[in-house]
Amino acid sequence: MNPPRSLRIQSPVLFAAALAVIVSITYSAAVPSSVERLHSNVSWLSDPARQGRLAGTSGAVDSANYIAAQFREIGYDVQFQEFGGNRRNVIARLGAATNVIVAGAHYDGQGTGYPSASDNAAGVAVLLELARDLISAKLPVSLLLIAFDDEEQGLNGSRYFADHPAVPLENVESAIVFDALGRRFLDLKEWTTIVLGTEYSAELASVVRKSGGKDILNIGADLIGPRSDFAPFAARRVPFLLFSDGTYVDYHGKGDTAERIDYMHLADVCKIIGAVIRDIASLKMKPAYRSEPVYSMDESAKMLKLMASVRAEKKDLSLAYRLVFDDLKSRIPMDPSRESIRMATSALLAAATPAHARFFLDVELEPYYDMLKKQSIVTALREESARSGS
């Protein structure tokens, strides 16, 4: 077929260039981009037909089968790890090397009526995208990509895997977990991607410094507690990292929908995690687990900056949080212990997720300020707790 008159270019070089542009445009339209694939996978997993992916339900089983099919299509060896109650981890393996890097995200959700898009369909979508990205990387280690079941009811899938590992845990160089991605923490203007775990491995700390972006908030896992699938690995002294964008107003709520995910950001996080995995794989020595944590030198400064952003942007911030943030602003730089920075984390999480605020207010913040005999803050915290959802 003759090209249109407008493409009848005399110069063969110019004609070849024009043809390359047409082919590129056609190919781009035919092959989904990373952003499109992420959107497609999050949308499928968070669709009401999945019934919120509560562990043990048909929606979770359908999701496990969907994830396994995606892994197989990409080219991974896949197995199910059943652990009772109609629950199963999906384990995808690439490579035959003895040393292994584990990457994982839980696929279960909150149940019917709760899309659970950011937490944690987005993490699973990133896991699938990493599988596609890393299959041609020819890493000198094996990859074990795991979609964990039943995280929401007690980290049961990752605990089972750690108790019954598909490979010896001493061969696992690191476990990289991601949870609650694609939404801005506290719906702030700037992104805050939280990374936990570098305090237990000098090698992983070095990798994150090299590969992490400017939005990384590198903090100790002690500030969050064992609230995600990294915890069973940490308990067995496997070097670990957790990547999370943090919580938001409808965390664990009906508003955690696919439409609220920022897929361009999700693709960026996927690139960062992929770079981290490549860099870990290329280390000359296997990462070691420190006997004592060494916290990031800029941890306090970044936490103070985050609190300042909340104070500046959240004009409707309640009196309790204003008083706490103002007090901790002066207390953190003077406190050699971890208590004040831990209270800052609790206050930020309470402010970010009103439906879960009462735990942080009643169990952590009020006793702390009661001990300090800050009665005005205690009173404000009690009033805020009375207004909270649960």
Image (tube, rainbow, N blue to C red):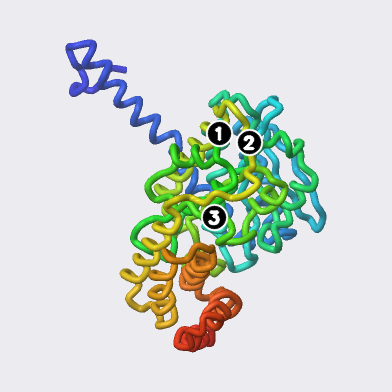
Q: Nearer the viewer, residue 324 or 67?
A: 324
Residue 250 in sight: no
Q: Is residue 327 above or below residue 138?
A: below
Residue at 44% of width from left, 37% of height from top? 210
Q: Amino acid at mark 3?
A: Gly
Point 63% across, 53% down: residue: 107
Residue count near mark 1 (Cα–Cα under 10 Å), binned few <14, some 14–19, many ≥20: many
Q: Dot 3 lies on which element?
A: loop
Say which of 46 and 316 sits in front.
316
Query: Alpha-carbon distance for marks 2 and 1?
Result: 8 Å
In depth, the one of 324 and 339 nearer the eye is 339
Quadrant location of residue 211? top left
Q: Nearer the viewer, mark 2 or mark 1?
A: 1
Residue receiving disc 3? 220
- Marks 2 and 1: CB-CB under 8 Å? yes
> Whole-percent x and y of residue 252?
56, 67
Residue 175 locus on image (x, y percent): 63, 43
- Which-is-in-front pick, marks 3 and 2? 3
Q: Earlier in the sequence, mark 3 or mark 2?
A: 2
Q: Amino acid at mark 2?
A: Ile
Residue 280: give its label: 1
| Quarter residue 58 falls in | bottom right
Residue tagged 2: 101
Q: Is residue 261 above or below residue 168?
A: below
Seen in the picture, residue 131 relative to 387 is either above or below; the reply is above
Residue found at x 41% / y 49%: 265
Asked if one can make out residue 155 in the rendered structure from this viewpoint, the answer is yes
Alpha carbon separation for disc pair 3 and 1? 20 Å
At x 39% / y 50%, what residue is drawn?
A: 215
Q: CA distance from mark 3 to mark 2?
A: 21 Å
- Residue 9: where, in percent of width, then height? 19, 16
